[in-house]
Amino acid sequence: MTIPSYNKILVPTDGSDYSFHAGEHAVYLAKNLGAKVYVLNVVNVDLAFHTGIHYAEGVTELEAEGKKATDKIRALCADNGVECEEIIIKGQPSDSIISFSEEIKADCIVIGSIGMSALERVLVGSVSEKVMRHAKCPVLMVRKQ
């Protein structure tokens, strides 16, 4: 039996309480396992596209919000003595999270979940569910109580 080792933990964040709670779990794991945390924010360019002629401003605003989101988890890492790297990329969230996890060879993805109903998942989709289904590494889905 091979015992898994987690050296690279990816935690995607959108700035929500749900993703910060997942960040708390990621930091806990990293601290106890000696792992590095990669904090990722994906700027959803599809959202910025809907701003029309103000596309560049929309992207800039989303990048600034993404930086605030990653900063919160980076600070949590610093407070706990956990090595951390912040990354902000552009793309479709679930696909980008999966691609980035493969690029860095993440050992685990820790992602927050709102806990949508089955109907909500069908109508709007769930980034966390798509990541869980398609990632090539283990995924810890964290729900905020």
Image: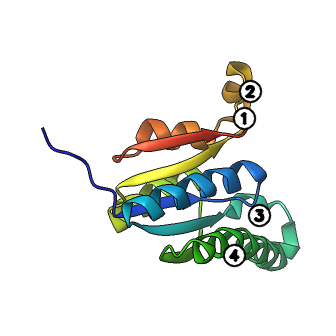
Which residue is under mark 4? 71
State the separation of the CA atoms marked 2 and 3. 24 Å
Q: Is 125 left or right of 110, judged from the image as shown? A: right
Q: Is 22 left or right of 8, judged from the image as shown? A: right
Under tag 2, what secondary structure? Answer: helix
Which class describes the residues within 10 Å of circle 2: few (<14), some (14-19), or many (20+)? Answer: few
Regarding residue 70, the answer to whether it shows in the image is: yes
Pick the front one: 128 or 8 = 8
State the separation of the CA atoms marked 4 and 1. 28 Å
Regarding residue 96, the answer to whether it shows in the image is: no
Q: Position of residue 53 (x, y in %)?
A: 87, 73
Above or below 118: residue 128: below
Rendered image: mark on residue 103: none
CB atoms at circles 4 and 1 under 8 Å apart? no
Under tag 1, what secondary structure? Answer: helix
The quarter in which the N terminus is drawn is top left
Which residue is under mark 3? 49
Residue 6, quarter of the rendered image: bottom left
CB atoms at circles 1 and 2 under 8 Å apart? yes
Pick the front one: 23 or 130 = 23
Under tag 4, what secondary structure? Answer: helix
Which residue is under mark 2? 120
Q: Amino acid at mark 2?
A: Glu
Q: Which residue reaches farthest top? A: 118
Pick the front one: 91 or 128 = 128
State the separation of the CA atoms marked 4 and 2. 30 Å
Select label 4 or label 2 by which is in front.
Answer: 4
Image mark count:
4
Q: Amino acid at mark 1?
A: Val
Q: Position of residue 99 (x, y in %)?
A: 42, 59
